[in-house]
Image (cartoon, helix red, strand yellow):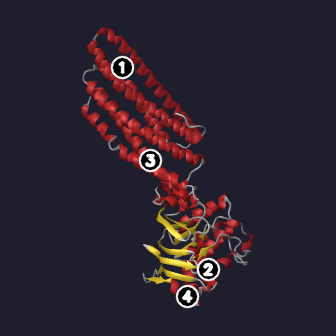
Amino acid sequence: MLPTFQTNLREVREKIIAIGEDLVKSNELILEALKDCDAEKFSKARNYIKNITSRTDEIDNAIIKILALYTPEARDLRQVVAYFKITNEIARACSNTRSFIRGFSDVCGELDVDTINEYALPMQTSTVKAIKTSIAMISIDDADELQEMYEDVLIEENKADDLYEMIERKLVSQAENSAKSFETYHKMLRALRKSEKIAGRAISVANLLVYIKIGGHLHN
Amino acid sequence: MAVMKIKKFSFTYPGVDHPSLKNITLPIEQNKITALIGPSGCGKSTLLRSMNRIHDLYPGNKYDGKIELLDLETGKYNNILEIKKENEFIKLRQQVGMIFQKPTPFPMSIFDNVAYGLRIAGIKNRSELQDRVETALKGSALWKEVHDRLDRSAMGLSGGQQQRLCIARAVAVKPEVLLFDEPTSALDPISTGAIEELIVELKKDVSIAIVTHNMQQASRISDYTAFMYLGDLIEYDKTENIFLNPKEQQTEDYITGRFG
């Protein structure tokens, strides 16, 4: 393939990584904010993922241009298609992050520290690890290393899933105690659902990156 | 900035009533690649060949309009359709070189092939000739493959190498414009890739017009694309606009294979 194709594709990859890294920074800051319900940190976390739509539109149009001009094939085609879908996954993860910030900011003050330490922190820690690893995978070319990192993302995503299920069960038990605490836990659960979704996006991104390398059929 | 301005240009072959090109207006931008696409008989090769008056090897052609070539030294445009003298034609073809569909190496050594145009241009000094030949072969991505056999016949090279040799021969005389008439249609995919890469590299130093039937080739390498049909210029625009958002239905039908 022509060097101009490689240059265009590299630019797309760099832009995806830039958005991905902002998503990671945002989620890392959320993790910090959760520890002491710091509204300022929540607000800063939101700033990292501003104007995402215009940035993803730019990437999408660059990808369409690459498809129209270079008609890539085989690995090149997988890469372009995967980048298109990865951009969408990251955009949706940003949207989930915004919802998480909004939802948790509302309920944070009402939760006791133990509850946050027990549920929110470990879950968000797993989410951060999952998304951070999947974004780092974009720059990896070695198939074995990519596979190892994929396993790491999978483990963290499973952890986030399990923690979410535990919170759900806790919520059911709370329902019997008091309506007030049930409502608070329910709000927290709704917010944490977004964190779990972000981890889900991370595994989708990792899947797509493995697809580029290994090939086969595209599946979500 | 345009290195060549084609203005209301019409062309009629000798003994034919109807013009093969009708009222074509088109710029060839400096240090850019302009692709001419269209179905067989649309006039794209005729237009390309008019750009260095190669039709005039045979008499009786009828031209209308202007084809203005930028003189890089004076910054003025000269209408090449006014050229009449033999020495002016030679100068024009040094300024506007041409690469054909089938490689056309001369039956002489690799060195002499590249030095041919330089000798005609009056360069006799052996060391200067050697320098210019080496530079041209390097610029055409052929030096590594032939530097140890420059005195051997060019006819022993592969098709792709012969085509790059022809490009080196054209590049050696430092043209302003290079015209490529389906330069890869007789080559395998590997040689095609090498030539495409070379053409993209060459545009740093020279402006390029290329006729191709390969739509992917036009989209891959060109900056501007002109779509022609039955002697008319239907649409001219940046390549990404032509292949992504063409304005004319005929253009869209052609590039998507729904033509006719």
Along the viewing direction, whichever of B105 and B249 lies nearer the viewer: B249
Chain designation of label 4: B
Answer whether residue A139 is visible to the viewer in this image. Answer: no
Image position, residue B170 (x, y; %): 60, 76
Q: Are marks 2 and 1 on the same chain?
A: no
User: Is B21 left or right of B151, judged from the image as shown?
Assistant: left
> Numbered disc 1: what chain?
A
- For mark 2, what is the residue? B16
Q: CA distance from mark 1 to mark 4?
A: 88 Å
Q: Which residue is mark 4?
A: B88
Q: Work out whether B195 lies above or below A37.
A: below
Q: Quadrant of residue B214?
A: bottom right
Name the outermost residue toward the bottom: B85
Find the distance from the CA under tag 2 to the CA under tag 3.
50 Å
- For label 3, the crowd category at 10 Å Cα-Cα, with few meaning under 14, some 14 to 19 and many 20 or more, is some
Q: Mark 1, residues whose alpha carbon is within 10 Å: few (<14), some, or many (≥20)?
A: few
Instruction: State the separation of the CA atoms marked 3 and 4.
Output: 51 Å
Q: Amino acid at mark 1?
A: Glu
- What kind of residue is marked 2? Val
Q: Say whether mark 3 and mark 2 are on the same chain.
A: no
**Secondary structure of the residue carrying numbered label 4:** helix
Which label was assigned to residue A60? Answer: 3
